[in-house]
Structures are given as C-alpha cells and as structure tokens.
Amino acid sequence: MKLKLPEGEFKAYLFDCDGTIADSMPQHYLAWKTVLLEWNCEFPEELFYEWGGMPVAKILSSLNERHGLCMPLDDLLRRKEEIFYSNLPLMKPVPEVLEHIEARHGEIPFAVVSGSTYDSVLASLTALNLADRFEAFVCAGDYKQGKPHPEPFLLAAEKLGVAPEHCLVFEDAQLGIDAATAAGMASVRIAAPWERAAALEQDVAEAVGNG
C-alpha cells in the first residue's frame, strides 16, 4: 500500500510515532484494556483510535471524567507502559512509512511528534532500529497544549529550524491531521491497521483475478 504524498518540496518530515512509524496501536489498546479491566472502565476501540495522538495522561483523566471514576493516574500509567514494553519484541514498522524514512534519511531532517512519553517513543523506535533516524523529539510533557492544537508541530519545526510551510506531517489520527493543518503544514494520513489489511486483501484479489 503506497502513500501518495502532497506535491511540494518539503525540507523536513514530522512523524507521529504510534500507528504511523510503529504499528503499535493494537498493542497500546491491549495494554489500556488490561489496566482498565479492574476498574470496569469501558474504553471502546473506536474511541481509542479517535483519541489517537492525545497525551496518555489526558486519556486517563478524560476516562475518569467520562465514567465518574477516580483511577490513580501515576499507577495506571506506569502499569500500562509496563504491559506495552513487554510486547515490544512483537512490534513492526508501518511499511509504507518506513519506505519514506529510508528514502529521505540524510537528505532532510526528521522529527517525531507524539502524545506518548519520550521513554515510550524511544523504546518503540529502538525496538525497530530507527531511533537514530530522528534529529528531534517532541513528546508528552514538552508542550502545554496537545493535538489538535498546533503547538507540538510548531515546536518540532522550531527545533529543526524549518519553517512550518516547508514541513510535511505523517499522521494516522484525525487529531494529528487537524493539528498539522492548524500549524500551516501539509500532511499525509496513514491508514489504520484494518484499512491496511482491507487494502492488502483487495490487492491480492485483484492479482488473482488478473492472473
């Protein structure tokens, strides 16, 4: 499944991490479901993907407010990350994004702009042998207002020394696409896991039909 990039001469690429570079969203969701189970806290998968790019602390506080709960922030986030880390050996990159990382690495600077913690992002990228590809990281705690506010992407552009209009954002979540647009940046949307699977099935069916 190829990515069709917007037209333009971009001087920097800004990448979300989970679901964009790393095919990690299913593993994050499993970790959330596991730690929320003892609180009988529902977190529908559709809502999980809708909140993609939201800082992890904000997700938990939003769930507390949504369900009238008082789940302990630090304890649950620590345990959620521990479960996620235990599954890192199973992680794979998103192939169509990896293609563009490999093609432009060394030509233009890259940054990661994520709602996850720096430790989580670094662990994912290290597991994929990609941590050394990026010149800058903007993660949870680095900004006051998360996606869909443009602050995270504008901060990344500033760190790279590239004007926002010359940056291309790779994102899988609508919150991130909205943030990129608000920052004055072009963007390309990465398909969700089930969308990539459906596209692959269609490609196989077409290949068989043409065979």
Image (cartoon, helix red, strand yellow):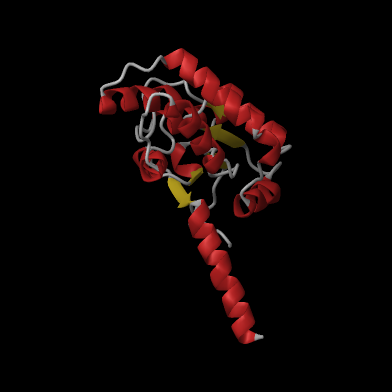
- Which residue is pictured at 62% across the width and 85% down the height? 210
The residue at the far right in this view is: 129
Q: Is residue 125 above or below residue 140?
A: below
Query: Residue 105 location in percent, x, y?
Result: 69, 43
- Residue sitting nearer the eye, 201 or 16: 201
Number of marks present in the image shown: 0
Residue 7 showing in the rendered view:
no
Residue 78 showing in the rendered view:
yes
Query: Residue 199 location in percent, x, y?
Result: 53, 65
- Residue sitting nearer the eye, 55 or 90: 90
Query: Residue 122 location in percent, x, y?
Result: 64, 27
- Residue sitting nearer the eye, 71 or 39: 39
- Residue sitting nearer the eye, 174 or 75: 75
Residue 120 located left or right of residue 189 = right
- Which residue is pictured at 58% across the width and 79% down the height? 206
**Quarter of the N terminus within the rendering:** bottom right
Q: Quadrant of residue 69?
A: top left
Query: Residue 184 location in percent, x, y?
Result: 38, 41
Q: Is residue 125 above or below residue 68?
A: below
Q: Is residue 173 above or below residue 41?
A: below
Residue 181 located left or right of residue 188 = left
Q: Quadrant of residue 132?
A: top right
Q: Quadrant of residue 56?
A: top left
**Quarter of the C terminus within the rendering:** bottom right
